[in-house]
Amino acid sequence: MSEQSEGEGWWLAVDGRWYAPHLHPDAQAAEAHETAGDSGTAGGPDDADDDAGDEASAGATADTSAVADTGHDFSRAGSSAAAEAERLAAEREKLEKKQRNYEKGAEGERITGQRLSTLSAEFVVLHDLHVPGSRANVDHLVIGPNGVFVVDSKAYTGKLTAGDGTLWRGKYPIRDKIETLTFISGRIAEHLEVPVASIMCFTEAELPQQVNQLGAAYAVTLNALVPTLCSGLAIHSADKVKWLARLATELLEPTKRQGSGASAGQSAPAASGRSSSKANTKASGGTAAGSKPSATKSAGGKKKPAAQSPARKRGKKKTSFVEALFGLVLVLLFIVFVVPRVTKIMTRSSTSTPPVASAVSLPATVAFSCPAPGAGYSMTLGWPVGSKSLISYQIVAQSAGAEIFNQSIFSPAATLPPVTGLVPAIQITLITTATSYGKPLPPNEQVVTAPAEPC
């Protein structure tokens, strides 16, 4: 076979076969080169990449639409469980915060209790009492010769400010806390039948003053607690303190209110026992064993009382006489032994009643002195003479309408800073307000004049 036998341009391959011209390797290389040149001229490599990106995007869109076309929405899967988990997390956070507050409050009460343990043996201190007729409780109750005090512990932190007759924690007043404390003190006073003062002790917070009077209550720092409790004159004897302490210990029994219920519960079985006895009697034929019927039936079917023997009648008369004699003996014993004791207790109670406080506050003691020539007079003020049963005493001094002194004291032994630099013959108005048994007395106003001679 010749080389051209298969046609013009055909060529013989190594496998012994003839192939068309366009299948020759040289012809294929030339065609590939021409194709590459045409592509670069038309769009270039960037267009090829864009086309590839468009194809990829189209594929992704196709895939997404394919998922969307299935009709399944996975975004709601687990939403209810997630919402419940969030609710429980928020509730847990609130409970943990509440737990921390209770723990902090308990620690504050322990700190206050430890400070109260430094009081002398004349005082009786009780902790954690319930308030009659209320769900509230008393943190600490102090009974001493100079009065009875309800002490409420507050473990607040930070700085409290004064304003509008109360103290403020930031923008929130503690007026409601003071009202609750005075309510508790009133209930304790009703139970003990003596006046009770209200003291709120802040174990950590910074107060405007060591002792702050807020109406009928006091807000004090931890360091001022014991001096405040020890201030004032003695109004209770040692026996009266013990007696009040015995009354107060009744409030230590949280189950005391259940006593009537327990008694009722104990009487119920007895009543049921009597009922079962009656039932057994009825089941056994209407009479108890060994007893006789109280009535018999006549021929007409009517019941008539059974005839009683004369001996039985005499026994009844004898029993009635013994009962009357026994009752007379009981009355005589009551008159001889019980009545004198009751009278003695009532007399002792009436004699130990606290003295009635004075109608108005007493004037303060005033003393002028000249500490150095030319320095002006000094005025020293103090606890009133002859005062009794006072818990606190406030002195305000005014001159020409301006306040030059304002101080509260809680003990006759307290010393006040003098008012210095006073000119001779100056007139000063003193306004004093005393608090007796936790209640402020009407103020007393007096005018004093400094010596007219030069200092």
Image: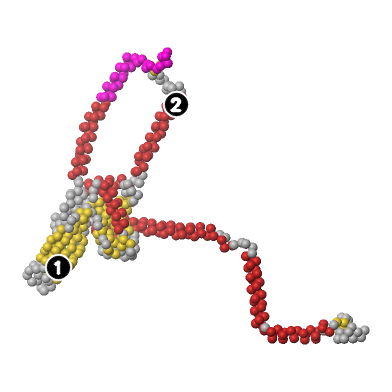
Residue 285 in percent (x, y) is at 45, 21
Height in image: 345 above or below 369? Answer: above
State the extent of the magenta-drawn residues as a range: 297-325
- Which residue is tagged 2? 280
The amino acid at mark 2 is Asn
Quick check: 89 left or right of 64? left
408 relative to 206 in the view: left or right: left
Q: Which mark is residue 454?
A: none
**Residue 453 appears in the rendering:** yes
Vertical order, 429 against 257 (above or below): below
Q: Which image quadrant is residue 404 in?
A: bottom left
Q: Please give the count of numbered marks on the rendered protein.
A: 2
- Disc 1 to disc 2, how far (Cα)? 96 Å
| Residue 121 showing in the rendered view | no
Element at badge 1? loop
Quadrant of the image occupied by residue 443: bottom left
Q: Which amino acid type is shown beneath numbered disc 1? A: Ala
Q: Residue at x 22, y 29 (%)?
A: 332
Which residue matches tag 1?
400
Query: Which residue is depicted at the point 9% across and 71% down?
Result: 455
Is residue 280 within the magenta segment? no
> For the point 54% across and 60% down, which residue is it?
79
Q: Is residue 280 above or below residue 169?
A: above
| Residue 262 at x, y percent in the picture | 37, 39
Residue 308 vs 5, above or below: the answer is above
In depth, the one of 375 and 226 nearer the eye is 375
Viewer-nearest of labels 1 and 2? 1
Q: Residue furthest top?
A: 299
